[in-house]
Image: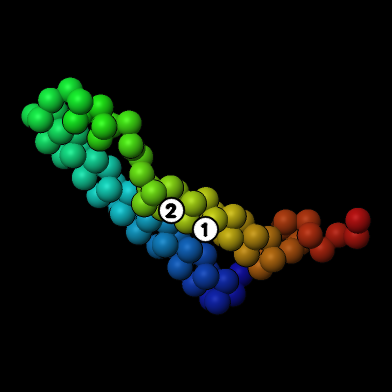
Amino acid sequence: MSDEALARIDQLLQMQQEHHRELAELIEQYRAMVFEAEEQGADELYRVVSGLPGGKYHVLTTHLRETWLTLQADVARLMPEQSGIDEPG
């Protein structure tokens, strides 16, 4: 495999790692929001929890899913013999 291919795979894995870090930070924020809401009473707690996970969570998980798909497609394209995409259908 070429250095370029390995660099691309590494880049995509770094992106995944960063998305997971952002997701972990977001969930930590959700936890803080829940504890703060609990102090304000059951109605506020319900309002906060029922609104989770929130738009940013959905955006991050979409990025995660799309990056995995991109990685799989790139590996197949970069390694056609191993992936079987160069075989006649």
Quadrant location, the N terminus: bottom right
77, 64: nearer the viewer: 64
Reply above or below: 85 against 7: above
Q: Which numbered disc, 1 or 2, marks the residue closer to the eye?
A: 2
Reading the image, the residue beneath label 2 is: 59
* Residue 85 percent location from the top left of the image: 79, 60
The image quarter containing residue 82 is: bottom right
* Residue 19 percent location from the top left of the image: 38, 56
> Looking at the image, which residue is at 42% across and 62% down?
15
59, 66: nearer the viewer: 59
The amino acid at mark 1 is Thr
Determine the CA span between mark 1 and mark 2: 12 Å
The answer, for residue 65, to whether it is visible in the render is yes
**In the visual, does 66 lie left or right of 85?**
left
Reading the image, the residue beneath label 1 is: 67
11, 79: nearer the viewer: 11
Q: Which of marks 1 and 2 is nearer the N terminus?
A: 2
Reply above or below: 46 against 36: above
